[in-house]
Amino acid sequence: MTTHLDGNVLAGTLGELFAVDITSAMGQCASCGTSEAMGEALVYTDAPGMVARCRTCEEVVLRVNRTAGRAWLDMRGISCLELRIPGE
Amino acid sequence: MARAAVLGRLTWQVGTVAEILEETATARTIVLDVPGWPGHAAGQHVDVRLTAEDGYSTQRSYSIASAPGPGRLELTVQRLEDGEVSPYLTDTLRPGYPLELRGPIGGWFVWDPAEPGPVLLVAGGSGMVPLMSMIRARAAAGSGAPFRLVYSVRSPQTVLYAAELERLSKTADGFEMSYVYTRSGPPGVKVRIGRLTPVVLSAPGWTSKTAPAVFICGPTGFVEAAASLLVRAGHDQDAIKTERFGPSGG
Amino acid sequence: MGIVSPGFRGRPRSGREKLPPGQYLVTDFPVLSAGPTPRVDTSSWKFSITTEAGQAHSWDWAEFRALPSEEFQVDLHCVTKWSKLRTAWRGVSLDTLLAQAQTSAEYALAHCYGGYTTNLPVADLLDGQAWVAFEYDGRPLAAEHGGPARLLVPHLYLWKSAKWVRRIDLRAKDEPGFWESLGYHNYGDPWREQRYWGD
């Protein structure tokens, strides 16, 4: 049986792509409309890529595939992302 | 709490091992000098990357154990028997060796010493590491925020930071703690052996009515059990932050 | 490439077995998943094939198990670099399942309980190259490895061997599946190391 990790685990890979911390960002799930901190997402990492799912409805909110020199990011599962920008 | 002055993406840096401290028979604290290290928030982690001579590389995440501060950071690593990375860090690394890392990582599972509210920390095994960073941050900042630690371990021999935790719980400044022993307890002391229970999680002044911020960290099974007990005891789900280490416990 | 870590060797990588480029051998059977393990009872399980003309053929578990099946041994190659050799399965050949389908479709899209999808050329499903497998190592296929039944197409990377398969659509137009739409190679031949787009 596979279990998930918590959204904190997104911070490393997405920290290479985003200039601000993604785990404290609020994401609105495109499937069920619930807004949650990305740190609360259910993240599956035992896979060819990282898959984050909504804590409420379990649909995919974000996917990322990382290899040397390239990354693919699918955020169709998030309809809106509110990011905290530090120092302002 | 450390904030980046300029927005930028995470990149790999090379630190140098300054010291290796023995915490238990199988756990080590690695003290690293990282040039330009901006400091970190209590609860954050780093990703460590190891590369073999043929170019094969692998990486793992490790929580930062030290209190926030620039230049130097400490990681506590538990050696896993079939581990690919942890035995290298606990047994092969020497002072002077380089270690590639990126971080600090994570803005959600963090505690800010400016927050005055009560905090309940629930640690399973090596899940103690990021929570220790919070305890140390609290001490360094002179924070009076009430802290309670429930630390579940297999036996007294597997306790991380035992002496420091004992010292801190003796200074009556609002830090208290309880151990949960799952396999064996201290010799000569009558103590309950078994997993986490609702009774241990609650204490005078530490019920769901206290509404503490809760941080739970450890192996996945432990985190799920602890979170479930706390929610059933009336704690607000939104006040609980969890960091699962995965089935092997990091 | 990062700096070399003095004294780090990592898990054993060389050996006498001939493996596709970049792979290493494992003896356990790693479980990879993009989500929670679907729990599908055989009493409600159904497998369908639909054609580009909209015709569908379905089998429930009893009907599926009544089809001729075969035992076979194959090597598995996962794009995450592990390979497991000489794994033993029992399954129904896609040649059997596609025998009745009237189709000239060139492409297939597999759909699974839990939402996973993967695409393949129909030609790669035929001629003894693919099965819907329901037993591993002589026992009913465990849920974590794709049970009650999974697609098995061992000549391609293992992400094409869709776990918890429920339907295969035969299509005139190719449509990339779950990983193929996130950078993984559309075809995925391990011997040509086709892991990512552009490989």
Image (cartoon, coloured by chain):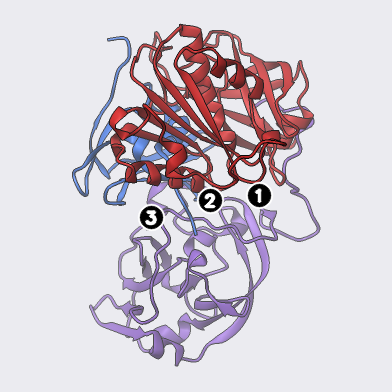
Colour purple belongs to chain: C
* Mark 1 Cα-neighbour bin, 10 Å: few <14, some 14–19, many ≥20: some
Residue at 48 percent of width and 55 percent of height: A2
Three-letter amino acid code of the residue under disc 1: Gly
* Mark 3 Cα-neighbour bin, 10 Å: few <14, some 14–19, many ≥20: some
Please tell me whether mark 2 or mark 3 is closer to you in this view. 3
Secondary structure of the residue carrying numbered label 2: loop
Chain A rendering hue: blue
Q: Which residue is mark 3?
A: C178
Q: Quadrant of the C terminus of chain B?
A: top right
As measured in the structure, the alpha-carbon distance from the residue carrying label 2 to the one carrying label 1 is 10 Å
Q: Chain of mark 3?
A: C
Secondary structure of the residue carrying numbered label 1: loop
- The answer to whether any part of residue B39 appears in the image is no
Q: Which residue is mark 2?
A: C195
> Do labels 3 and 1 touch, CB within 8 Å?
no
Q: Nearer the viewer, residue C165 or B152?
A: B152
Secondary structure of the residue carrying numbered label 3: loop
Q: Residue furthest left?
A: A33
Spot occupied by residue C153 in the image (x, y as percentages of width and height): 52, 70
> What mark, if any, has residue C22 been given in the picture?
1
Three-letter amino acid code of the residue under disc 3: Phe
> Do labels 2 and 1 touch, CB within 8 Å?
yes
Relative to C91, is B109 above or below?
above
> Do labels 2 and 3 touch, CB within 8 Å?
no
As measured in the structure, the alpha-carbon distance from the residue carrying label 2 to the one carrying label 3 is 14 Å
